[in-house]
Image: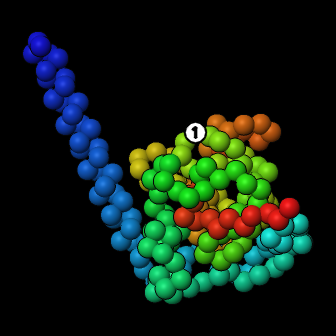
């Protein structure tokens, strides 16, 4: 191996290691700030579309946002659910309970029960996370820019309780061209009765 190749290999490995360390430090710092008891964002009433467990649209409702402090969320959620929904963590690909779920049904927010997705818009993206080409209602989710992990992405949150559910990308199928890449830990699946 010549000197130029060896040097490139050493510098490349050092760069990759430093990037991994930086990403880890960034995640720890973001988690530290996410652990406070204060709520952020709009605290006023919001409008969402309610759905029955069978997926029938029940109408638009004006509701107060669901607000709980850190200890209340920790009592309600499993450690993984808390890390994903309250601290914006991401579960491992192909390990979530719902990535390979193909039964008809409704996907609700695990934190507050708000309807987020319907199985009619679910597709296999090959990424290892449940993927949908649209939310069940635009009012039920909100999107915000996310620059964690060194890349600009669009975070998807539950409009009712601000739970982090995943990210949306523009490489999905028609008719929307969107891929809502969600965490299984953020969703509660309600099977549709035949």
Kindly give the residue lying farthest to the top in the view shown: 2
**In the foreground, 133 or 169:** 133
Q: Which residue is mark 1?
A: 126
Q: Position of residue 158 (x, y in %)?
A: 65, 67
Kindly give the residue lying farthest to the front in the view shown: 194
- Give the residue at x 29% y 58%: 25
Colouring method of the image:
rainbow
**In the foreground, 51 or 148:** 51
Q: Quadrant of the C terminus?
A: bottom right
Q: Position of residue 132 (x, y in %)?
A: 69, 49
- Asked whether, in this view, residue 124 is left or right of residue 121, the answer is left
Residue 78 visible, this angle: yes
Looking at the rendered structure, the secondary structure element under dot 1 is loop
- Give the residue at x 74% y 64%: 191
- Give the residue at x 23% y 30%: 12
Q: Position of residue 6 (x, y in %)?
A: 13, 21
- Asked whether, in this view, residue 66 is left or right of residue 84, the answer is right
């Amino acid at each position: 191996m010549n000197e130029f190749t060896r040097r490139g290999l050493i510098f490349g490995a050092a760069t990759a290691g430093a990037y991994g360390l930086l990403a880890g430090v960034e995640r720890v710092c973001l988690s530290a700030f996410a652990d406070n008891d204060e709520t952020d964002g709009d605290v006023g009433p919001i409008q969402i579309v309610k759905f029955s467990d069978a997926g029938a649209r029940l109408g638009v409702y004006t509701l107060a946002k669901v607000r709980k402090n850190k200890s209340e969320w920790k009592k309600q959620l499993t450690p993984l659910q808390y890390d994903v929904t309250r601290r914006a963590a991401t579960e491992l690909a192909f390990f979530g309970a719902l990535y390979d779920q193909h039964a008809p049904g409704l996907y609700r927010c695990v934190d507050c029960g708000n309807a987020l997705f319907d199985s009619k818009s679910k597709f296999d993206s090959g990424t290892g996370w449940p993927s949908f080409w649209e939310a069940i209602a635009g009012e039920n989710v909100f999107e915000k820019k996310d620059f964690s992990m060194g890349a600009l992405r669009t975070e998807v949150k539950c409009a009712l309780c601000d739970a982090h559910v995943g990210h949306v990308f523009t490489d999905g199928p028609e008719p929307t061209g969107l891929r809502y890449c969600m965490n299984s830990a953020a969703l509660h699946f309600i099977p549709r009765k035949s």
